[in-house]
Image (cartoon, coloured by chain):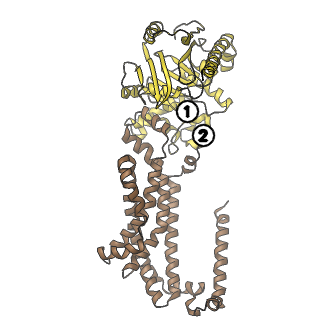
Chain colours: A yellow, B brown
């Protein structure tokens, strides 16, 4: 990771620059040593008459972890689906690596849904090995491919358990192993811990942070929890209520501190969290006044 | 609860009913009350005696009926599964054929049976066709329902993991539908024996239904009940077999019903 200012608040909403221009400058600042993994330009999307995204620009350098937070129903998940190539945007352009076509983006992204969605008829290891299995390997080969990662993630003893025998936290870990084993350069995580209790959730955040430290992947993490996004991500963008625009773009304190309890109690962390919450709250109020 | 304890309540009810029936028949209560000739009301002990004395005749005919049920049911599973898959994969086909599938269930089998016999002869053909016609509906509708139970998030997840339409079907939709298929098959097999009896009544020279018709006209009431007992036992055994299969190959069902 490159060195960054500890925090840098940019109220994009207050400076209505032409979208193309701001994206240019952003790409100059942000292009990491490995180039840009994801580039969104003025993404707009509607479902029928319901406008969901009202012009989102985002540049993610390869290897970065970006958190996306915003109020419920603001279109965070839609944004992930657009990046993944599961949908095409109403307007704007998306590129993942060098790919712009939906089908090609689909080849570069792995999507981890909110609930673990493990297949109940497959054992934990076979669930994790789904991607190699779907891509033509035999069941035995797929298991061999999955096994090293499985033990690296501390899941070895659960290899042969069925999902129903696993706790919510373990299931989420298996689901994450499945996402990693897709071998895709870009991971799209849609509120991966939303269904867990607070304690398990904190555990898993720490676990995920450590796991991601050793993985050279580009990650977009959607969350409604500012603290979670700040702890896990290098950078965080804050979206307004629907139709969503970017209202803040914040650098997370770097480097990441372990354990989590230390990280979230640091002063720098607290400052960025306040800025994020202010951006969320301010925009929510503004939205109410307009409505 | 142990299997024995679970079985206690239904067994007690059956034993009580049989005992009541035995007493009523022995003391000719039913005969007196409804002015039926006493020899037309066999006691359970008479039925048991008939079961034993006619065991070879009953088994021979049961074997014939079992063959009809087996073939008809297998045909219904094959056609029902093919139909469900076709209607699931093509919305146009679904719109076009679904009313027909439902319509097939409104056909009065008892009227169609003689027509099928007239068309297909007195052999096993019309019986198989009638049984398949009855069984086809619950299998098709349940399987179609199951194929549609896949969650949108699962579909998306699989797509980003590299699955195309065909793989999503085999790796996700078919397994999801399997418990539904089996539960439809359980319903189907229970009514299949009734279809077999209709088929045999419409024209045949063997089978339990044929035997019942014959014995009824000859006032061999104990043997009518004996044949009925064998027929019920067959249906219950087939149902049990499918329930066992369901537990073996689709054991995850309880979880998939729980929306968490």
Residue A205 location, x and y as percent?
61, 25
The residue that disc 1 covers is A114
Circle 1 SS class: loop
Residue shown at 41%/71% (left/top)?
B109
Number of disc labels = 2
Residue B69 location, x and y as percent?
42, 70
Whether residue A98 is visible: yes
Placement of the C terminus of chain A among the 4 image quadrants:
top right
Alpha-carbon neighbours of circle 2 within 10 Å: few (<14), some, or many (≥20)? some
Residue B197 location, x and y as percent?
43, 76
Circle 2 SS class: loop
The residue that disc 2 covers is A166
* A215 in relation to B154, above or below: above
Dot placed on the residue nearer the N-terminal end, 1 or 2: 1
Using residue B170 as the reference point, say whether residue A226 is left or right of it.
right
Alpha-carbon neighbours of circle 1 within 10 Å: few (<14), some, or many (≥20)? some
Q: Which mark is residue B37?
A: none
* A24 in relation to A133, above or below: above
Q: Give yes or no for contact between labels 1 and 2 (Cβ–Cβ under 8 Å).
A: no
Chain to which the residue tagged by mark 2 belongs: A
Using residue A204 as the reference point, say whether residue A187 is left or right of it.
left
Q: Nearer the viewer, residue B30 or B253?
A: B30
Chain to which the residue tagged by mark 1 belongs: A
Using residue B189 as the reference point, say whether residue A101 is left or right of it.
left
Task: Give the quadrant of residue B196.
Answer: bottom left
* B59 in relation to B190, above or below: below
């Amino acid at each position: 990771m490159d060195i960054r200012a500890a925090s840098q608040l940019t109220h994009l909403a207050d400076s209505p620059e032409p979208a193309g221009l701001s994206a240019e400058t952003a790409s100059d600042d942000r292009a990491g040593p490995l180039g840009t993994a994801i580039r969104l330009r003025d993404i707009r999307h509607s479902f029928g008459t319901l406008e969901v995204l009202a012009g989102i620009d985002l540049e993610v350098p390869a290897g970065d972890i970006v958190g996306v937070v915003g109020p419920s129903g603001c279109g965070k998940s839609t944004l992930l689906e657009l990046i993944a190539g599961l949908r095409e945007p109403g307007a704007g352009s998306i590129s993942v690596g060098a790919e712009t076509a939906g089908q090609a983006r689909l080849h570069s992204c792995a999507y981890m849904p909110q609930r673990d969605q493990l297949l109940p008829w497959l054992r934990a290891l076979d669930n994790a090995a789904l991607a190699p299995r779907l891509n033509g390997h035999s069941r035995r080969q797929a298991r061999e491919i999955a096994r090293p990662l499985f033990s690296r993630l501390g899941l070895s003893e659960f290899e042969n358990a069925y999902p129903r025998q696993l706790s919510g936290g373990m299931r989420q870990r298996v689901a994450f192993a499945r996402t990693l084993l897709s071998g895709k350069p870009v991971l799209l995580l849609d509120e991966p811990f939303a269904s867990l209790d607070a304690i398990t959730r904190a555990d898993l955040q720490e676990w995920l942070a450590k796991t991601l430290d050793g993985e050279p992947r580009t990650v977009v993490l959607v969350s409604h929890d500012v603290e979670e996004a700040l702890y896990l991500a290098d950078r965080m963008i804050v979206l307004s209520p629907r139709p969503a625009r970017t209202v803040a773009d914040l650098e997370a304190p770097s480097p990441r501190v372990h354990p989590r309890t230390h990280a979230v109690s640091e002063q720098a962390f607290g400052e960025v969290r306040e800025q994020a919450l202010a951006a969320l709250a301010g925009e929510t109020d503004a939205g109410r006044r307009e409505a | 609860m142990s299997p024995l304890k679970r079985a206690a309540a239904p067994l007690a009810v059956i034993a009580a009913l049989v005992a009541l029936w035995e007493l009523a028949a022995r003391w000719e209560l039913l005969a007196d009350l409804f002015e039926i000739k006493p020899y037309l009301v066999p006691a359970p002990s008479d039925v048991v005696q008939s079961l034993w004395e006619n065991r070879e005749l009953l088994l021979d005919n049961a074997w014939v009926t079992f063959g009809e049920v087996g073939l008809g049911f297998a045909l219904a599973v094959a056609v029902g599964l093919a139909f469900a898959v076709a209607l699931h994969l093509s919305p146009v086909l679904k719109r076009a054929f679904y009313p027909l599938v439902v319509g097939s269930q409104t056909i009065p089998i008892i009227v169609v049976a003689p027509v099928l016999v007239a068309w297909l002869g007195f052999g096993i053909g019309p019986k198989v066709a009638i049984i398949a016609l009855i069984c086809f509906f619950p299998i098709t509708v349940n399987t179609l329902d199951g194929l549609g139970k896949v969650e949108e998030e699962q579909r998306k997840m699989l797509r980003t993991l590299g699955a195309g339409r065909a793989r999503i079907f085999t790796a996700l939709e078919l397994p999801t539908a399997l418990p539904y298929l089996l539960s439809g098959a359980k319903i189907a097999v229970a009514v299949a024996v009734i279809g077999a009896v209709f088929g045999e009544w419409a024209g045949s020279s063997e089978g339990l239904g044929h035997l019942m018709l014959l014995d009824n006209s000859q006032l061999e009431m104990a043997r009518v009940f004996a044949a009925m007992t064998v027929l019920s036992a067959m249906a219950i055994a087939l149902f049990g077999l499918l329930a066992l299969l369901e537990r073996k190959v689709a054991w995850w069902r309880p979880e998939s019903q729980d929306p968490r």
